Amino acid sequence: MQTTLDTSKDAAYEGGITPDTSTEFGAKYLTFSLAGEDYGLEILKVREIIGIMDITKVPQTPDFVRGVVNLRGRVIPVIDLRSKFGLADAQYNDQTCVIVVDIGVLMGVIVDTVQEVHNIPATEIEEPPRLGASVDTTFILGMGKVNGRVKILLDIDRVLTSEELVQLEAVADR
Amino acid sequence: MNKETNNAFSAQTCVEKLSKLSNGIDESDLPGLAMMHEVCAELVDAGDTVVSTDGLGVARDLVKSLEALILGQIDDAGAAIHGLHESISKLTSLVAPFSSEPEEALDQDTQIDESVAAKMDRIFEDEEPQQDQEPSQEVAIDVPETVCEATEDKPAPNDPASEPSPSQPPYVAEPLMISDEEVEMVAGFVEEASEHIDAIEAAVLEVERAPEDTEAIDSLFRPFHTIKGAAGFLNMRDIVSLTHEAETLLDQARKGSRKVTPGLIDLVFEVVDILKVQFEGIRNHLANPTDQAVPQPPIENMIANLRDVVAGRIEPIGDLPATGDADKKTGENLVEQGAVPQEVVDFAVDKQGSEPEAKKVGETLIDMGVATPKQISQAIRPQSKSTSKTSGKTGTSGADQSVRIDTAKLDALVDMVGELVIAQTQVSSNPQVSIDTKLTKDVTQATKIVRDVQDAAMAMRMIPIGPTFQKMARLVRDVARKVGKNVDLTISGEDTELDKNVIQQIGDPLVHMVRNAVDHGIESADTRRTVGKPGSGSVALSAYHSGGNIVIEVADDGKGLDAKVLIKKGIEKGIVQPEEQLTDEQAYNLIFAPGFSTAETVTGVSGRGVGMDVVRRNIENLRGKCDINSTLGKGSTFSIRLPLTLAIIDGMVFRVGTERFIIQTVTVEKALRPEPQQITTVQHKGAVLNVRGRLIPLVPLGPLFNLGKPIEPCEAMVVIAQYAGGEIGLVVDELLGQQQVVIKSLGERFQNLRGISGAAILGDGRVGLILDVSGIAAAYDMSRLSTVRAPSVNKMTPLDRHSNITDSHDRKDPVVKNEMTMSPA
């Protein structure tokens, strides 16, 4: 049930260059896709990558909280990043992954596909652009350029702690 | 002369100890070095009445070099150790002749001493460059002065016969600073010390019971000594001085030169109380470190008092320094003594009321820093007799057979074992297994081992309840004294083991119940005699296994609970309606209501009505139950029924929609498929189930948790679950069975969930949520908790909303969540 996808192994061992720590955000990033967009999150935050598994729903939680799963004896919350970013829900398939991140506590993040690990030096990272009021750029560390493509580098701590998981009041206001 | 021989003898023992300790010592053996240091320091403390001036010089140097060794300041440790051995053998030869032929020995001493001093100097050259300028003789010359200072500074010699030196300066406290490097050591010490304090308390009670038993005094001596040693090592001068004085006093008792009187016992308890405050201060400091000195209670008076007692100037009689009155509260006495203004006491009493664990006024005052433990102890000094029988041993034995393990590691082990069991179950249920007989046999064997491993892992968290009971012995004694009653405490089943977490959390409720038993339960001696009971009351604490649970009982042979009086009080307080008919049991349960007190007057001990409701809450937090049995005039028994462990519950698993939930089996009264005539709908919106005349509100779990449409109860199952406020019927799709589950926390991100107390990993590896019945009731029915009364139409209003959402069942429906927001969070 908790099959570790091969992609994770490949991802973890690829690109063995020492991370460029001279600048603020230059580091290794795990990239993944979400509704056709490429995202990245700091590899140091990633604990492991697992395939999608049975998720137990938890009542009184916002939509993006899909529930909890059993990670080898530990019960951890799982959130759907599509739902969190207000993207259309997608059917889970064998490409769907749960990236387990360590932000002080372990949390699972559901993404469409995990791609690879890139070493992105600070020189290749740009400030988050102006995106209008509809996009919350506080979640974005910067825009990383890799082989001519642009990856949106996420501040995963902010993404996961910006909202309470148990939302009694906020739901009512919708 | 007689005195001299005595002293020489003790010096000899010191030196003997030293040489024993120095056997095979090396620089890495810090405890050994610390002990040597202590012995040497004792020798130096004893001063030149014990050894010759030169011997003292050697001893002082020894102390210095030991210090340097312990602190790791010496580069060439080997040489230093060698130097130590040499010094000790010199000391041996110095001390031995001193007792027999002191005059002759002296010459010889000087020579030896010089060589030793030179040796020492060489060792010290490395780390103290200034010192090597001094000629070696000067060390020897310097010694007498320094020693004099040291003796003045330090407490009087142990010999009770020695004249109290009137010139002995009063003790001056020193601010205690804890440096960053020491923090870890200090933390360890404080933790350890509280165990020693428990041991001391148990031993003191033992000594009080059998004053002639020198073995008991010995066992009292040991923890004091250990605290002193470690505190000395960490430079906690206040604690060292205090324990030293107490030790001196106890030494007199041990040697038989002082009788063990109640006054002496009280004095030792006072010392223990001050120590507790000292450790509390250090603990607080460690929790919130500042650059300031650690706040420590003033101990000058206590030291002076102890010294006076040791010197025989005063008797350790309890009421000597006291001005208290038995019938008055601590606070009042303090005000009378002028120690604390009335307003402060009032504030402390308020504060006390608001704190869940209901400290004594005295403790609160000490915490606030407005009164010293000394003043408090004087205020609570009223005389009464109390004896406590504890059948337990003083519990120091077997300590070396245990290992301290971080509970997080244990939890990780338990988690992993849980996973192992699941994995094992999956393997053994694999159809391939049954095909191959050899494989079947092997898997069965592995399953058996896995179960054993699980049991063993679970057992690791279990500790005996004995020490907790021992603490109650002190409490009974104190409370009995305070309220002027005679109370015997009997303890049984102290070997019964409980989960460590349970033990930690059961302490406070137990304190309340024991305090209540002594204060409210037991009558005064006069009243007891008039009703034909023995003058001294008895409180029995016991623990035993019963059907997968642990039962802890607090029984007293006092006046018992009067149901009529309770009901009358209940009506006064508006908790009970006058027309209500309560059974005795229901009446007894009234004492758990907040603000309910049976005491006619509020005393310093109890009766404020804060307590039993907290007790009940604490016990429920431990997933336990509290029952009361009482016979008017004969006494009451409070039984706390607790699960063996907090980690595992017996659960009933059922399905709601696609999800599985677990409910604790003890809370389930019954599960049934109702007949249509048992159900009464209200405005076709809410429903109650009639079970033998009781009307039980039905809670449709699916809609409540947004997991599906409301289902027809008659086609589903109703689980009738009990909670503190009554009972509710949970409408569920299907019952799946009963099993033991390991409770997992959902983590703090989910801590506000209402109605869900945790999660468990079920047999197939998926997560099931554990229900919290009172949480569900609160989520469902926010207006008030239901009582034993039949629910009224009014109460069913929340159901209105549920029936409105009959056909909107997808996750995004906000209506049900809307309802949750109305709860009084």
Image (cartoon, grey):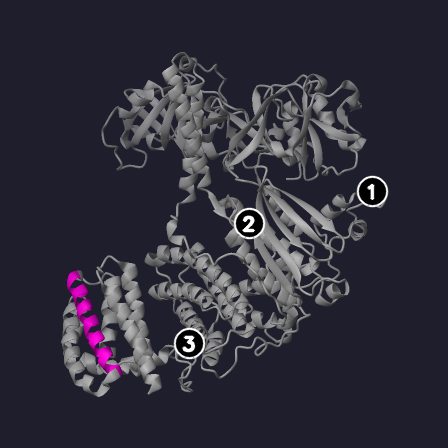
Q: In this view, does B539 lie to the left or right of B597?
A: left
The three-letter amino acid code for the residue at tag 2 is: Gly
Same subunit, tags 1 and 2? yes
Which quadrant holds residue A28? top left
Confirm whether residue B821 shows in the render: no
Q: In which quarter of the image is residue B672?
A: top right
N-term mark: 3 or 2 = 3
Compared to residue B377, the image places residue B458 above or below, namely: above
- Please tell me in which quadrant of the rendered image residue B3 appears: bottom left
- Chain hosting mark 1: B
Marks 2 and 1: in contact by CB < 8 Å? no
Pointer 2 residue: B493
Give the position of the N terminus of chain A as an image quadrant: top left
Task: Tell which tag, 1 or 2, sits nearer the viewer.
Answer: 2
Residue in the image at 57% along x and 61% along y: B389
**Range shown magenta:** B78-99
Q: Determine the chain carrying the residue at label 2.
A: B
Instruction: From the viewer's perspective, tell me whether residue B230 is left or right of residue B690.
Output: left
* Main secondary-structure element of the magenta-colored stretch: helix
Across and down, in percent, residue B760 comes to 51, 30
**Where does label 3 land, which residue?**
B172
Lower position in the chain sequence, tag 3 or tag 1: 3
Q: Where is residue B115 in the image (x, y as percent from the top left)?
A: 13, 76
Q: Which residue is disc 1 drawn over?
A: B581
Q: Distance between the residues labelled 1 and 2?
A: 38 Å
Residue B727 vertical placement versus B249 (above, below): above
Q: How crowded is mark 1: few (under 14 residues within 10 Å), some or many (20 or more)?
A: few
Q: Visible in this render: residue B653?
A: yes
